[in-house]
Amino acid sequence: MVKSIISKYKNVPVEVKASIYYTICSIVQKCIVLITLPIFTRLMTTQQYGQYSIYQSWMNIVAIFATLNLQYGSFDTAMIKFENDRDRYISSIQGIVSVLTLITLIIYIIAPVFWNDLLELPSILVLAMIVEILMSTVLTFWTNKQRFMYKYKPMIIVTLIISVASPLIGLVGVLLFEEKGIARILGNTAVYLCIGLIIYIYQLYKGKALYDKKYWTYALKFNIPLIPYYLSQMIFNQSDRIMISRMSGQTNAALYSVAYQFAVVLVFVINSINSSFVPWTYRSIKDKKYNMIKKVTNIIIIFIATMLIVLILFGPEAIAILGGSKYKDAIWVVPPVAGSLLFLFLSQLCINVMFYFEENSYLVKGSILSAVLNIVLNFLLIPVFGYVVAGYTTLFSYIVFWLSNLYYMNKSCKDKIEDYRYDTLFDWKKIFIIATAFTILIILLTFTYYTIWLRIIFVGIIGIIALLNRNKIIEYFKLIKG
């Protein structure tokens, strides 16, 4: 029996093994974050945890300018285009990031007081941020190359070391020092510095160049036009916490952050579904199998909506475990933020098609519109209704993001697909009905937070419906698998 399993395992293609291990690694990473979160929320005050969450938010935004997101965008295409010179390409763009982070450091040194006030962070954390941006980007270059070459073992080892060491060292720092927010951040930075520096030297040794005109030109030309898109997406994900901190205090930013981390816990599942769905969609468009796209898409949307509803129903219990009693008011953030993930997936359906037809300019327009709307709504509503409203501005902005991408997708398809109608690729009439019912439902589910019995009944109803329709559900999964 064991020999048979080992034999079958050896015959599994390396691409499949790599995909399986990457997925397991992602799940383990997410589990470590969720397991350690209750420890830190109980050891740190809400203000200290708020400082940590604000640091993370600002770092993600600053990183776009300090790295141009060179680890994304152009990287995969470069691994194909420069297949025989990958090491030199990586060491060269490492040089770009090194120069950009040095420029970032100089800009900070010129006016440290201004930047400290803007970021709401002391100098030591701003310097730590710049170091972590450089080292984490270098590590991402390396891990992306390992993924591309299906060398999953070293990538998984390094990823798990970081995933375990970062919270462990952070925990030691939190226990030993009074400034627990700073200790948590510096512990994380120390891990990235130690491992990232080794990878930096190794990649420089392999590529033997920090500058290559050909590779610098290629990377900069590809990624600079995408900066508005990357920035708008980061604003979607991070601006809520920054604005809450500025307008309502770091304590409320901490409450929102804990609820947000739970609400988006399924985002990696949705991203995995989309990653698997994209190649099939592209083949189906090429083969003009439009009806099959409609059928499978509707099933996936209902599946994602159901997962999100179950997640929302367990919101109060999850926040109680993750944050404790001092975070109990954060439960009201969970429904709208979790609900926004469905509209993120609907937007991705449109974005996939635009990428297929190489209409990237439309993508940037929709992203900027929605990001600006999110900021304006937060600016107007947070002072009036408090931090919880940021969850609803996120939901509304993602709905607008979806509708704008739907508009631009239809516009790009008219010239690409013969006799194109708005429902040629997707059954938007049914999708609109599902999306509307889902939005109304997640708002109604907030009223069940007052009593656990209502939510238990609701979960039971979902279970009974699933049991009665099990044969149909199995057929749907077979259809998707096929």
Image (spheres, helix red, strand yellow):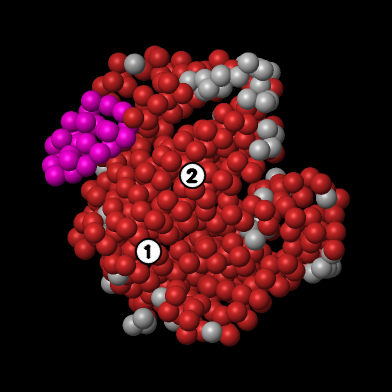
Q: Does the magenta stretch include residue 444?
A: yes
> For the point 25% across and 51% down, which residue is it?
331
Mark 2 residue element:
helix
Q: Which of 256 and 242 is in front in this view?
A: 242
> For the point 43% across and 41% down, which residue is it?
400
* Residue 474 position (above or below residue 359): above
Q: Do the residues labelled 1 and 2 touch (CB within 8 Å)?
A: no
Secondary structure mostly taken by the magenta-highlighted segment of the chain: helix
Q: Residue 157 appears in which quarter of the rendering? A: bottom right
Screen quadrant of the N terminus: top right
Q: Residue 243 carries which label?
A: 1
Screen quadrant of the C terminus: top right
Q: How crowded is mark 2: few (under 14 residues within 10 Å), some or many (20 or more)?
A: some
Image location of residue 53, percent across then percent down: 40, 65
Q: Which of 340 and 331 is in front in this view?
A: 340
Total numbered circles: 2
> For the point 66% across and 33% down, which residue is it?
356
Residue topped by disc 2: 268
Res. 103 visible in picture: yes
Mark 1 residue element:
helix
Image location of residue 309, percent across then percent down: 31, 35
* Residue 224 position (above or below residue 109): above
| 61 sits left or right of 204 in the view | left
* Residue 476 position (above or below residue 72): above
Image location of residue 467, percent across then percent down: 31, 20
Disc 1 to disc 2, C-alpha distance: 25 Å
> For the point 39% across and 56% down, which residue is it?
376
Residue type, mark 1 in image = Met
Q: Does the magenta stretch include residue 43?
A: no
Image location of residue 110, percent across then percent down: 58, 85
Q: Which of 18 and 351 is in front in this view?
A: 351
In magenta, the rendered stretch is 437-462
